[in-house]
Amino acid sequence: MKWQIAAGMFLVLGLIVLTLGLALSEMPRMELFKASNDARAVESGALLFENSCRACHGPQGKGIEGVAPPINAADLYDGSRLAAVGWSGTTEDYVRNVIAAGRPVPSAGTTYPQRMPTWSDRFGGPLRDDQVDSLVAFIMNWEDRALAEGGGAAPPPVVEGAVGTDLTVSLPEGDAARGQQLAEGALGCSGCHVLADVGPAWNAVGDQPGVGTRAATRFTQDDYTGQAADAQQYLVEAVVQTNAFIVSGYQANIMPQNYGDRLTGQDLADLIAYMNSLR
Amino acid sequence: MAIFRMHIPFLDEVKAKGLRQAGRAKADDLVTRVTAGLNPSDVRGLLRDDPAARPNPRLTPHAEGFWLHMRPTYYHTLVDGIYPTFRLGWLSTFFFVFEIITGVFLMVYYTPSPDAAYENMLNILGNVFFGSTMRDLHKLGAEAMVLVVALHMLRTFVTGSYKKPRQFTWATGIILLGVTLFLSFSGYLLPWDQLSLWAVTIGASMVEAFPPEVVGQTMNLIVRGGPEFNADGLLRFYLLHVVLLPLIGIVAFGVHYYKVIHHGHSLPPEAEKVGEDTAKRVPLDRRVYFMPRIITRELFYIVALVFLFLAAATFFYEAPLEIKADSLVTPLHTTAPWYFLWLQGMLKLGDKVIWGVIVPTVLIGLLLVLPYFEVGPSRRYGDRRIGLSVAALSVAAIAVLSFMGTPWYGVSTSAEQEAVATLLPQTHPGPVRETEWEAIELGTFTASQYTAAPNPAMAALLETFHAEVLKVNDAERSQAEGFMIVEDWQTDLRKVTLRVVWTNLADNSPGEYSQVTYVHRQAAYNRGGGS
């Protein structure tokens, strides 16, 4: 019994010491927790971006010309874009608002064909508040690099020898592999035609064949409204005169109408070669 | 006549005896009142372990005070040692109180709503003084309580202490076991993270199987508050956890302990004749008095256990918290809490109705009424070979079933998914996230060439990956290879892609599976167990 009293006394002292030590380390521990929690928000924001945003804004948020504007760009963080749209709050609030509530009207001077959808579940979107916050944390983490890189949403580059919108243009020999690179990279075609159900899928899906097979017969359909006389002309028309014929079930004015100014003849030939390879 | 008269007797005493004498007498009086009957010299004698005076003043607090009237004044020397009780009943009570105290602390910072619960957790961990420690203690205490209560039941069975006249004590004990399990289970949901939502979803899925269908569906709706867990379900679990189950627990505990004291702690089986119960007839020379022996020991145990748990929570243990619950995303390899793994294992045996509802109900029913049909008079080990064998087999069966409940048994996922999940598990941080951030170097790394990795940490990751990727090769697939691609993504943020590629033997076509994660320099998954 005596040893129990003695050991108990020592343990009470130990408890006091332990509690004091714990109390002293609480402030730094809580700071550490908050830092790690903020970091994890960036991680989950990055995953959300990958799943929900990259199809239109590009994998690194650099935007896709003709689809959606860049986010990973200096003008968003240096205040010039906020000034242009007349936003008086902070960049972070602007980003949160645009993600949550979408952009029902395009900014003046832009011609992006689609509106930014609403993402917050408060406005009928799929994301919870904490997910919107994570996305904002991820996007705001671009700030230092975007500012260091400088520049902003550069005006669309003038393409030397652009192919124009004439369907009867004669095209050089196409390279399907390079066409695939274009479709999945700079042109952003895959954003709508593979990943999302915004435009008709190029790949064969279910009993519907790939775009190459469909193009061969599409222009002979009764409801066809375009001018194409053969399969190649049909594909050229689909890229450069996007409203000439809208496949049933899809909407006009969604697909950017500026590919005629952005592609060289070689680009278009490669792209068509790639599409023709999808049977 | 005055409306009221104030009289302070102490002042009269000061007048009569002087301040010093009167003050002393008053202090003595105070000690006697607080201890419900022991004056200071009695207390001194107690602490010194002096022989008790006659009549024994140390019995007065048992007669006068509320708390000690519940405790016996003496124990039999035969039940005073570690054997035969192993102190498991006492420990169960200790943890119950421990959980109430830590639980009330956490309750202050908690709102039972899907919109707030997870954010409350972040607040407790990042903003509340001792918040993380209290949460760790509550969680550790809960795990320990489940273990201790289960062992308590096993011990009671093994020493035959459930036999006449203690049948009803046993039955209330089974109720307390259920209360303990469901307290722990209902608390599991409250943090509202992926871990808690899915563990509880698995546990609650049994309810739905209850026949007939309409009953199962209705019960499921009542438990979950809807087809899926939602705000109502969370509130119900919270109310179960903080009101109903503790209430049932306190009432059942009162009955249980009353019965324990009423019948006396049962002596070791070999200490009495078969069929006799002599626990209440304690000879004078076999008595260990509560004061001072037992109370000193219990106070020592309390201090030691609190110290032990506080040290564990400080240096070794951190209660897990995954990302916020999402009823649309089921993490791969979710399991029920460990004490229900045996149920998850039974569910894998076959029909949900038989193994998930009927068998557990029958087992619990049998356990409840066990002492009323197992009426063999002898408590001695040698006479109870069948009973003890059944107990040993049951323990073994629970162990095997618990193993079967884990993802290592009977879960059919594809090998490539498993390979990636080994490095990037969905139920805990796992190797990639726990590796030092700087060590995850940029570049493309091939799993089979792990010896060429730039540092030991990467080599370890790739070697683990490689070992798992090899399992992709089977009768239909060959040339499996794993890749780990690390890209610089943002300031302090790297993108890690784990990819498995293989060749399908049927048509020589390539196959591919990959998963992406992002790791941030400050995410600190590897910060270790301390809080």
Image (cartoon, coloured by chain):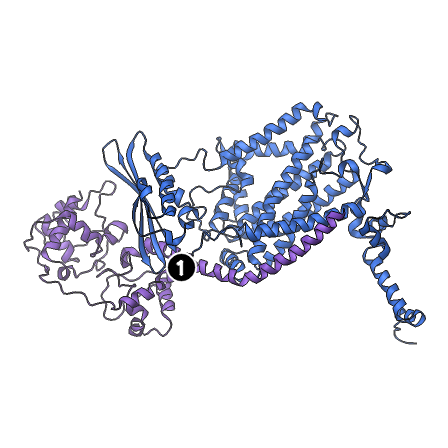
Colour blue maps to chain: B
- x 55%, y 46%: residue: B222
> Which quadrant would residue A98 be assigned to in this image?
bottom left
Identify the amino acid type marked 1: Ser
Colour purple maps to chain: A
Q: Is residue A221 visible?
A: no
Left-right relation of B132 to B480:
right
- x 76%, y 42%: residue: B258
> Which quadrant would residue B467 be assigned to in this image?
top left
- x 28%, y 33%: residue: B478
Circle 1 sits on which residue? Answer: A134
Q: Chain of mark 1?
A: A
Q: Quadrant of the N terminus of chain B?
A: bottom right
Left-right relation of A116 to B520:
left
- For the residue pair A200 and B161, the one nearer the viewer reads as B161
Q: Name the secondary structure under disc 1.
A: helix
Say how many tags the image has: 1
The location of residue B305, given as percent across then percent down, is 65, 48
- For the residue pair B384 and A278, the one nearer the viewer reads as B384
Left-right relation of B140 to B325:
right
Q: Residue furthest right?
A: B16
Q: How crowded is the residue under tag 1: few (<14 C-alpha within 10 Å), some, or many (20+)?
A: many
The location of residue B53, given as percent across then percent down, is 89, 48
Q: Please determine whether, in this image, residue B40 is positioned above or below residue A220.
A: below
- For the residue pair B190 and B338, the one nearer the viewer reads as B338
The location of residue B431, given as percent across then percent down, is 41, 46
The location of residue B34, given as percent across then percent down, is 81, 58
- For the residue pair B454 and B278, the one nearer the viewer reads as B454
